[in-house]
Image (spheres, rainbow, N blue to C red):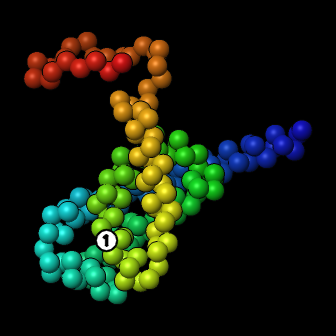
Amino acid sequence: MAALLQLRHMRAGNQIVALNEVRETIESPSFQKTILFVRELPQRLTDPEVRHALAQSQFPAEYQRLRTLANFFEHVGTLVKNRIINRHIAADLWGGVIVGNWNALSPIITNRRIISDQPALWENFEYLAVVCDDFRKLHPNGAFPKGTRRMAPAQRWPEVPERNYH
């Protein structure tokens, strides 16, 4: 019994370390710049020259950061899939970032899978995006515990329409 309890504590400690490393990466200035770059992708992908450049076996230099971002979320997805990081915690903390980046990168990922003949390329990133998307659908208004009182501000700005969060 004591050994099982010790294993549980070790696992929780490992999860805290992993969560902190993911948080630090996501909050880093270079990662934030990459996220801003990814937000521009849908517009960039309307240009046939950009699509052609991204369809080559090697990413153009200015797009290498996309590979780094996809690899990062691939690693996070592996940690979630193998239960090193709890999937609900990951989805609650970073679901919007993960789904947004997956949606922006999925056309590129789909084409990379075909070009490289690797249908499993970045599949753990895709798994992570599915987990986060499912979590968001399950909690469309957020995951605030039902029945818990809210600490709403005393005054609402007149420009902001009222909304019922419950």
Residue at image position (13%, 74%) is: 47
Q: Is residue 48 above or below residue 158?
A: below
Q: Residue 117: which quarter of the image?
A: bottom left
* Picture coordinates of residue 114, whole percent (x, y): 38, 79
* In the displayed structure image, the side of residue 80 where residue 63 appears, left or right: left
Q: Residue 46: which quarter of the image?
A: bottom left
Between residue 142 and residue 9, name the one nearer to us: 142
Mark 1 neighbour density, 10 Å: few (under 14) some (14–19) many (20 or more)? some
Say what amino acid the circle numbered 1 marks. Answer: Ile
Between residue 93 and residue 138, name the one nearer to us: 138
Between residue 26 and residue 122, name the one nearer to us: 122
Residue at image position (29%, 86%) is: 56
* In the displayed structure image, the side of residue 107 where residue 77 appears, left or right: right
* Picture coordinates of residue 44, whole percent (x, y): 16, 68
Q: Is residue 23 visible?
A: no
* Picture coordinates of residue 85, whole percent (x, y): 59, 50
Farthest left residue? 159
Q: Is residue 102 above or below residue 49?
A: above
Q: Is residue 99 visible?
A: yes
Q: Is residue 135 above or below residue 68?
A: above
Query: Mark 1 sits on what residue?
Result: 108
Farthest right residue? 1
* Picture coordinates of residue 80, whole percent (x, y): 57, 53
Residue at image position (87%, 44%) is: 3
* In the displayed structure image, the side of residue 17 where residue 45 appears, left or right: left
Q: Is residue 29 above or below residue 137?
A: below
Q: Secondary structure at mark 1?
A: helix
Q: Which quarter of the image is occupied by the C terminus? A: top left
Number of marks in picture: 1
Residue at image position (79%, 47%) is: 7
Q: Which quarter of the image is occupied by the N terminus? A: top right
